[in-house]
Amino acid sequence: MPFRADRRPDRRDSSWASLTSFRNFSSTGSWTPAFHLGRQVRLICREDSAVEDFLGELAVQELDLVLADRPMAPAIKVRAYNHFLGETGTSFLAKGPLAAAHRRRFPYSLDGAPCLLPGAHTTLRRSLEKWLDSRQIRPLIVAEFDDSALMYVFGQKEAGIFPVPTAFEAEFQRVYDVKLVGRLPAPRQSFYAISVDRKLKHPAVIAVCDTARRQIFR
């Protein structure tokens, strides 16, 4: 679920910043510095979408920044730049009893285990399936989600084991009251800031990216 700032009344007014993020960033503190710069930032909650869905708004400068879990493809004919923020492994979380039952022998304990996974079109889903298949680990997929927040809610209700970026693991455990099942060193999940600026200029954008690099992907 991305976040987008309300369209500013006047693009010449530098007191506004339009920022969009995929859901994994929303539960972290990466946004906090943008609200303490004396510039107005108004966020609107939106459902998960592909990176390309926001590039039109980025191109006409209705957005200042898109935070995404993959870079903008080179074939996309939009004048924008990928700024690498960091990468992390993948953790699997679940409610206490389910986590305890599958913690031993992880990740092989995922074979036949009830799992909640992101939709088949996502980068993470494809990477996870390739990694698990190579080790003949075949989870029982009880549900898959285009809306990652809904996946987390189902996980909170003990519907299955679900993956999150390791960098956000502690926050997800706190928010959804779930426990760690285990961590995978691979596949790695990468995160990017996409902007029309080759070098980031807006103070709010710089603050958000610097916080992500220093506190989340340190």
Image (cartoon, rainbow, N blue to C red):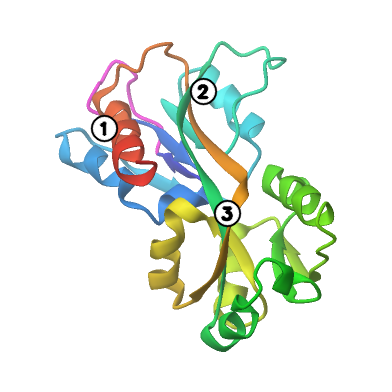
Please state which amino acid type lies under the numbered disc 1. Ala
Is 127 rendered above or below residue 64? Answer: below
Q: Counting residues from the N terminus, which is met first, the one under dot 2 or under dot 3?
A: 2
Residue placed under numbered mark 3 in the picture? 90
Q: Is residue 14 magenta?
A: yes
For the residues labelled 3 and 1, the Cα–Cα distance comes to 26 Å
Mark drawn on residue 207:
1
Query: Which element carries disc 2, helix, strand or loop?
Result: helix
Which residue occupies the foreground of this view, 198 or 217?
Answer: 217
Question: Under tag 3, what secondary structure?
Answer: strand
Cβ–Cβ under 8 Å for marks 2 and 3: no
Of residues 151 and 19, the one nearer the viewer is 151
Q: Is residue 78 left or right of residue 166?
A: right
Which one is earlier in the sequence, the residue at label 1 or at label 2? 2
Question: How dense is the environment of label 2, judged by Cα within 10 Å: few (below 14), some, or many (20 and up)?
Answer: many
Judging by the rendered image, the residue that carries numbered circle 2 is: 58
Residue at image coords 57%, 84%: 100
Q: Which mark is residue 33?
A: none
Type of residue at label 2? Leu
